[in-house]
Image: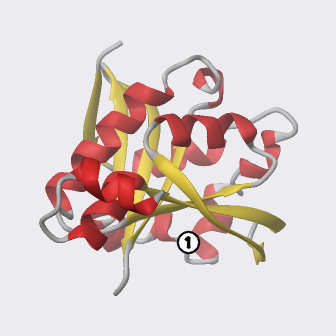
Amino acid sequence: MEFSICEFTEKDAKEICEWRYNSPYDIYNLPDWETITQQKWGLADEVKRKTEFYSIREGKDLIGYFRFIKNEEFVMLGLGIIPNMCGCGLGKQIMTCIKKVFVERYPNEILRLEVRSFNIRAIKCYEKAGFIIKDKCSKNTPMGYSEFILMELLDNYVGAFTRGQSREIAIEKMK
């Protein structure tokens, strides 16, 4: 499969609101578009859609999206894949596309993500993509109270703390 990264449109945001995941992943089902706009989610904000969100396409079909939220210390990654493609072995290819955009847009930043702790399938995908587990936390979200695993991209972790050392030496020192 060949994926392309494209501008994230209002049409994409509305389509994502219609995606429905089976249990136990149904916690990722978003409210309808009207609720999203009333509650002023990032998906509904045109400026945020243009500056933070990206769509992932296979041909013309929307198969996923991701978002980078920059703060002072790191960039937080959020992402979603169309339900019928979850668990199909596409994670490595999708994560490679996302990391490429990240490196182009934020070359010297640290990339983190949070994943619900029950989502072992996603955690394994992120580990294969180079993320390491940094911490656990519990918090309330618009989708309910959950326990999360905080993960950080190892390549960026090494780069942020080595300042000129080779990657191999830095990894050895971190052991």
Query: Extreme top residue here?
Result: 1
Q: Residue at x 68, y 67 (%)?
A: 35
Q: How is the image coloured?
A: secondary structure
Question: From this viewpoint, is residue 134 visible?
Answer: yes
Q: Is residue 134 left or right of residue 98?
A: right
Residue 127 lies in quadrant: top right
**Residue hosting label 1:** 41
Q: Residue at x 50, y 34 (%)?
A: 128
Closer to the camera in the image, 62 or 117: 117
Q: Is residue 63 above or below residue 127?
A: above
- Across and down, in percent, residue 19 comes to 65, 38
Residue 165 lies in quadrant: bottom left
- Across and down, in percent, residue 6 comes to 25, 41
Disc 1 crowd rating (10 Å Cα; few below 14, some 14-19, many 20+) is: few
Residue 93 lies in quadrant: top left
- Across and down, in percent, residue 103 comes to 21, 54
Query: Extreme bottom residue here?
Result: 72
Question: From this viewpoint, is residue 9 visible?
Answer: no
User: In the rendered structure, which amino acid carries the disc numbered 1?
Assistant: Trp
Q: Is residue 80 above or below residue 121?
A: below
Closer to the camera in the image, 79 or 95: 95
Q: How many marks?
A: 1
- Across and down, in percent, residue 133 comes to 60, 57
Q: Residue at x 28, y 70 (%)?
A: 160
Closer to the camera in the image, 7 or 166: 166
Secondary structure under badge 1?
loop
Q: Residue at x 77, y 54 (%)?
A: 117
> Quarter of the image containing the N terminus?
top left
